Image (cartoon, grey):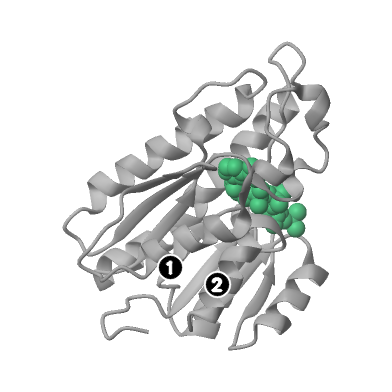
Amino acid sequence: MTADQAVRTALVTGASRGIGLAIARLLAASGVRVALVARSAAELSAHAAELGGGALAVPADVTSAADVARVISATRDAFGDVPDLLVNTAGIFVPKPLHVLTADEFERTIQVNLVAPFLLLRAVLPRWRELGRGHAITIGSIVDRTIFADNGAYSASKFGARGMHEVLRAETKGTGVRATLVAPSSTDTPIWDSVDLPASNRYPPRERMLSAQAVAEAVVWAAMRPSSVNVDELRLSAS
Ligand SMILES: NC(=O)c1ccc[n+]([C@@H]2O[C@H](COP(=O)([O-])OP(=O)(O)OC[C@H]3O[C@@H](n4cnc5c(N)ncnc54)[C@H](OP(=O)(O)O)[C@@H]3O)[C@@H](O)[C@H]2O)c1
């Protein structure tokens, strides 16, 4: 920890597996007390126990405003205040062409990938502005600028998340509150378990994707910059 380290507590959504779990692990290894959020209660408890250092598991559906209020209340109780760092990682990916995608799948994707990050941000921002510090890191995707077929709902949600991040950055510049967008390309996580990669012929094989650890390292690097530095955006792809 450096003397200027602004991050002592963090709330990480999507922490039951994949990129969110890798971020939670790396933050904990960097001396940060982490609240892990996702729906899978048993996995979260096991991961919190493994992390130690006062990590806590807060099972919740981030699309529910009531659950988000409960998460913030639990982290305030545990940390004594809102978390210094919010990492909005929870996300879903339904790769289907628009003429096949259902209205429910479209709406659910927007709820998890865009509305939920707003609900969490909205819950901590007033206090961050009061304190003159706090850091929101959004896990976006390269599809927030680059268009691929079969990404109608996902790309719409990630373009939206980038838009919200850029507005947040404009609104918080000069306040001490920081905002970072981390946009990875395909990353080897369980999100791909239900995708027939050879048949889709659109994505690299899993061994050629980024690792969740590489994405986590970018997130923790951005979080650990001196508080006078804002990392606006990081875009990652496999070399
Ligand atoms: N993997 C990639 O290729 C890739 C590339 C670029 C960006 N991303 C982005 O990275 C983020 C993490 O993806 P990943 O690959 O790590 O996916 P993953 O392995 O499928 O993990 C997704 C996480 O989100 C949580 N989650 C989903 N719906 C939720 C809900 N309603 N409430 C609370 N938690 C919820 C899941 O937990 P529960 O199921 O336990 O709730 C899980 O912890 C996503 O935003 C994704 O869009 C991924």
Q: Closer to the N terminus: mark 2 or mark 1?
A: 2
Residue 42 in percent (x, y) is at 82, 71
Residue highlighted by disc 1: 85
Residue 135 in percent (x, y) is at 36, 63
Give residue 163's mark.
none
Residue 160 appears in the rendering:
yes
Q: Quadrant of residue 4?
A: bottom left
Amino acid type, label 2: Leu
Q: Secondary structure at mark 2?
A: helix
Of badges 2 and 1, nearer the viewer stands: 2
Q: Residue at x 47, y 32 (%)?
A: 144
Q: Quadrant of residue 74?
A: bottom right
Q: Report the number of numbered marks.
A: 2
Q: Quadrant of the N terminus?
A: bottom left
Q: Residue at x 80, y 34 (%)?
A: 195
Amino acid type, label 1: Leu
Q: Residue at x 31, y 68 (%)?
A: 225
Residue 121 in percent (x, y) is at 44, 55
Residue highlighted by disc 2: 26
Outermost residue, front side: 239
Dot 2 crowding, Cα within 10 Å, few <14, some 14–19, many 20+? some
Q: Is residue 112 above or below residue 128?
A: above
Q: Residue at x 61, y 22 (%)?
A: 152
Residue 61 appears in the rendering:
no
Outermost residue, bottom side: 53
- Residue 206 in the figure: left or right of residue 66: right
- Residue 153 in the figure: left or right of residue 226: right
- Residue 65 in the figure: left or right of residue 94: left
Outermost residue, left side: 174
Q: Is residue 179 above or below residue 161?
A: below
Q: Quadrant of residue 75?
A: bottom right
